[in-house]
Image (tube, rainbow, N blue to C red):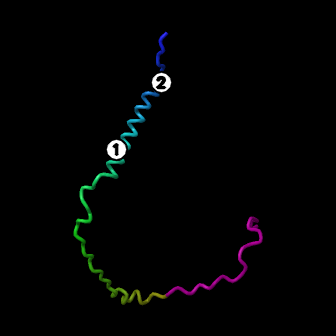
Amino acid sequence: MAILPNDKTKKQKYLGIVLVMIIVFGIFVIWYNFFSQPDFLPSTLPPQKPEEIIIKFEFLEDAVIETLQPFPEILPFEGEVGRENPFVSYE
């Protein structure tokens, strides 16, 4: 009597092949992205001089800004903080 492979062993064989292919593909992608040399080297580019920053303070002399007034000072809280039982309703 011959021993014939059943469907489970065929499926396992195909799944094993697919798994090996996925692992090989993953190794290739990792090798290609992380270990290959870039097309250009950023260090070879000449450094650029930043533009000079100029701040114009003339806007502070505007009449509208001179009419603004500061907020009044907020005094610290005076009184008892919290309740004896915070879970009781306010009724």
Q: Which amino acid does label 1 sit on?
A: Phe
Vertical order, 46 against 41 (above or below): below
Q: Give the range drawn in magenta.
A: 70-91
Pinpoint residue 79: horizontal percent, then vertical percent: 71, 81
The residue closer to the viewer here, 30 or 90, is 30
The residue closer to the viewer here, 91 or 55, is 55
Secondary structure, mark 1, is helix
Tell me if mark 1 has few (under 14), some (14-19) or many (20+) residues whose alpha carbon lies within 10 angstroms of its own: few
- Residue 91 vs residue 33: left or right? right
Quadrant that contains the C terminus: bottom right
Tell me if mark 2 has few (under 14), some (14-19) or many (20+) residues whose alpha carbon lies within 10 angstroms of its own: few
The reply to whether the magenta stretch includes residue 82 is yes
Q: Earlier in the sequence, mark 1 or mark 2?
A: 2
Q: Which amino acid does label 2 sit on?
A: Thr
Q: Which residue is drawn at 50% across and 87% down?
A: 70
Which mark is on residue 28? Answer: 1
Secondary structure, mark 2, is helix
Q: Distance between the residues labelled 1 and 2?
A: 29 Å
* Quarter occupied by residue 73: bottom right
Pinpoint residue 90: horizontal percent, then vertical percent: 74, 68
Pinpoint residue 52: horizontal percent, then vertical percent: 27, 80
Vertical order, 76 against 27 (above or below): below
Q: Which residue is drawn at 43% across and 89% down?
A: 67
* Quarter occupied by residue 48: bottom left
Q: Are marks 1 and 2 in contact (CB under 8 Å)?
A: no
Residue at label 2?
Answer: 9
